[in-house]
Amino acid sequence: MGVAVSTEGLAAHGLRRLAMPVAIVAAEHDGRRSCSTATAMYAALDPVALVISLAQRSATASLARASGWFSVSLPAADQVETAIATGRPAKGDDKFAEFGIPVAEGDERFVVASLADARVAWCCRISHEVAVGDHAVIIGEVVAIRGEPADERSALLRHDRRYVGLGEPLSTQDQGGYPL
Ligand SMILES: Cc1cc2nc3c(=O)[nH]c(=O)nc-3n(C[C@H](O)[C@H](O)[C@H](O)COP(=O)(O)O)c2cc1C
């Protein structure tokens, strides 16, 4: 027999079992900028596009909407303190400065600030947005990438309300089929 669970119960016993890549989403507009601990998934491989889901009240979501751009940076496991910091709300107009978050400034090609020394960072132009309850699901086409191909630091994940790193691989790399 099924068990009726409240929304609160589902959040506690369902979604927290999703192992999520920790992503730091950043956006800037008109002299203000913010960044938010979040998660990300690819929306398409051709063209390469990412999907994020930000709370409607998120400052980062407002700045992304206003500018049409956002960046997604994947911190390494050794950057967990940064992920903790970007998960807090800022009081002022620049969360990077307020919390001492290492920043890679935007430039002509990669037009939004991103996390410095991330395993990879993508600059995305917003192509779609769908309101889903209290969140905005935002898709952005990737126009530029930052990263160091030789970077072998562990990914940073979130699972069961904890930050975790990667364990040992459970298989060898597949040689064909799925490209990721
Ligand atoms: C591990 C983790 C993952 C999070 N993922 C999301 C997310 O996917 N979307 C979201 O809106 N907030 C997420 N949050 C909460 C935001 O990081 C937090 O509310 C932040 O202060 C928002 O900043 P902003 O208002 O400057 O955008 C997450 C927090 C943590 C700690």
Image (cartoon, helix red, strand yellow):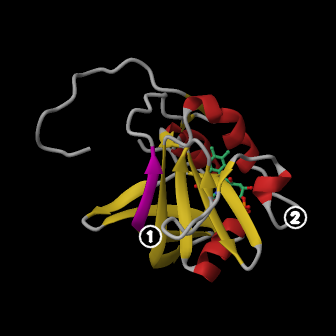
> Which residue position holds label 1?
139
The furthest residue to the right: 91
Q: Element under label 1?
A: strand
Kind of residue at disc 2: Gly
Label 1 vs 2, first from the N-terminus: 2
Question: Quick check: can you spot residue 132?
Answer: no
Residue toward you, 151 or 17: 151
**Main secondary structure found in the magenta portion:** strand
Residue toward you, 142 or 12: 142
Location of the C terminus by quadrant is top left
Residue range highlighted in magenta:
142-147
x, y (%) of residue 136?
56, 71
Residue at the (62%, 46%) spot, across then down: 116
Location of the N terminus by quadrant is top left
Residue at the (50%, 37%) spot, across then down: 17
x, y (%) of residue 90?
83, 58
Q: Is residue 144 magenta-colored?
A: yes
As drawn, 24 above or below 127: above
The furthest residue to the top: 168
In the image, is 142 to the left or to the right of 162? left
Kind of residue at disc 1: Ile
Q: Is residue 15 magenta-colored?
A: no
Quadrant location of residue 175?
top left
> How far apart, in angstroms, are the residues tagged by discs 1 and 2?
27 Å
